[in-house]
Image: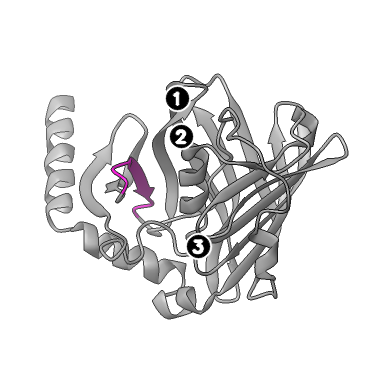
Amino acid sequence: MRMRAIVAAAVLAASHAAGQTADELIAKNIAARGGLEKLKAVQTMRLTGTMKLGDDAMPSILELKRPNKSRWQFTFEGQAAIQAFDGQSGWMLMPFAGMTEPQAMSPEEKQEAEQQADLDGPLVDYKAKGSAIELVGHDPALRPEDWKLKVTLKSGEVRYVYLDARTYLQTTTVMTRKVEGSEVVIISTIGDYRDVGGLMLPHSFSASTKDGRETQSLVFEKIELNVPIDDARFGKPKGQGKAPTPTGPPPDPSVG
């Protein structure tokens, strides 16, 4: 009887998947987030919260602005660290690590910052962005009830986006990143969705390696939409420097 039940469940899941397409799931995700019109109406976003890495809690502010600008600032040991992307190039300042002048991001960090700067997330207008999305189905090992989408970005990078089967909001992202020269699988968990100006926005992010060796989280206490943010905040201040050794990526607030 148990085997029959397992087979019946598998057949039901397969038939359910057959009735869905990637584009239909993306449309439901956009609708669940508040709709395309409201998403596109957001020109800037400021997210204020706290990042935790081990026993350290660091006040953080993430600012995003169309088109493709981002500025992430956090405070550690009384010193402000900054990672910013102005739409063309990225720079960073890490005084507690001995980086006392702004330095250019490594190619990996620049790519990460550019993706983070996308206010809409990777699912919206994915074809226009040069991406491809495929419906994988379900992942029994990680999120068995969620829909799993394979997202291939224009750069060739592949990430997997998981959507809740009931709300169609994003719950998880799985991607591979180079950290100190080695490829590491990063699992990001997204949650605590709240209504902000008619949009459902997540306020909680956590990222960990697949083997669980490193975990960091980012919790936002406040998210503000369409606040004035000067373009100058994203530009690199005076000072030159070589690209630093890549550090681990922060949790990615951009959602599908």
Between the C-alphas of marks 1 and 2, the distance is 6 Å
Is disc 2 in contact with disc 3, using a CB cutoff of under 8 Å? no
Please give the label number shown on residue 187. Answer: 2
Q: Name the amino acid type tagged 2.
A: Ile
Is disc 1 in contact with disc 2, using a CB cutoff of under 8 Å? yes
Q: Is residue 128 left or right of residue 252?
A: left
Which residue is found at the position 18% from the left and 58% from the top?
A: 20
Please give the label number shown on residue 210. Answer: 1
Secondary structure at badge 1 equals loop
Quick one: label 1, few (<14), some, or many (20+) residues within 10 Å?
some
Secondary structure at badge 2 equals strand
Residue 13 in the image: above or below residue 193 = above
Colouring: one colour
Question: Could you say which is closer to the camera, residue 230 or residue 235?
Answer: 235
Percent of width and height locating residue 210:
45, 25
Image quadrant for the N terminus?
top left
Q: Which residue is mark 3?
A: 68
Between the C-alphas of marks 2 and 3, the distance is 24 Å
Q: Is residue 14 left or right of residue 79?
A: left
Q: Name the amino acid type tagged 3.
A: Asn
Q: Name the amino acid type tagged 1.
A: Lys
Is disc 1 in contact with disc 3, using a CB cutoff of under 8 Å? no
Q: Which residues are magenta?
A: 155-165
Check residue 223 for magenta coloring.
Answer: no
Q: Of the residues tagged 2 and 3, which is closer to the observer? A: 3
Which residue is found at the position 40% from the left and 37% from the top?
A: 174
